[in-house]
Image: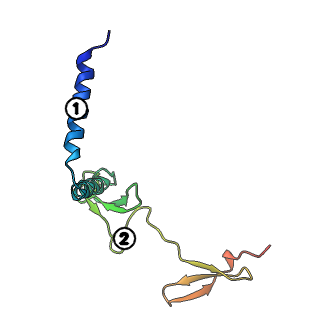
Amino acid sequence: MKNGFGESLRVLIAGASALALAGCTHSDWEAVAMGLNMAADDMAVTLTQVPPYECGLNAQNDPVCDDTGDGFADRYGDPNYEFVHGWYYPPPVRINDYGEAFQYDSGCDCWRREPSLDTYPQ
């Protein structure tokens, strides 16, 4: 035998929810969406574990850092000023029509020939 109280409570909650949501305007839903987005953004930082007093990457590959030493990220990091574990960009490589590789050198702001990366056309 089923308990009628639980089913009627669910119907009552569903009805109350529908009645409350019926009065929401478009701008209300935009505010709700913005609040949920802010909460998700905050959780992406605070729920990420990183080495104490260091930086790492969260699930979205954004750099995050721990300033308090508790092992959880407290803020987003800036890879221009902080060492971020796992954050590495190899130098760009260009390969011409002959399979010759050139690697960008930021020291001279030029492309240098790099024979070890050559790929010869088939």
Q: Quadrant of residue 56?
A: bottom left
Q: Quadrant of residue 85?
A: bottom left
Q: Relative to 19, is 109 on the left or the right?
A: right
Is residue 89 depicted above or below 64 in this figure?
A: below
Amino acid type at mark 2: Pro
Q: Quadrant of residue 51?
A: bottom left
Residue holding disc 1: 13
Within 10 Å of disc 2 (Cα), the crowding (few <14, some 14-19, many 20+) is some
Residue 91 percent across, percent down from the top left: 53, 76
Is residue 68 depicted above or below 14 in this figure?
A: below
Amino acid type at mark 1: Ile
Q: Secondary structure at mark 1?
A: helix
Q: Quadrant of the N terminus?
A: top left
Residue holding disc 2: 79
Residue 41 percent across, percent down from the top left: 29, 57
Within 10 Å of disc 1 (Cα), the crowding (few <14, some 14-19, many 20+) is few
The residue lying toward the viewer, choosing from 33 and 72, is: 33
Q: Residue at x 26, y 56 (%)?
A: 42
Q: Residue at x 52, y 72 (%)?
A: 90
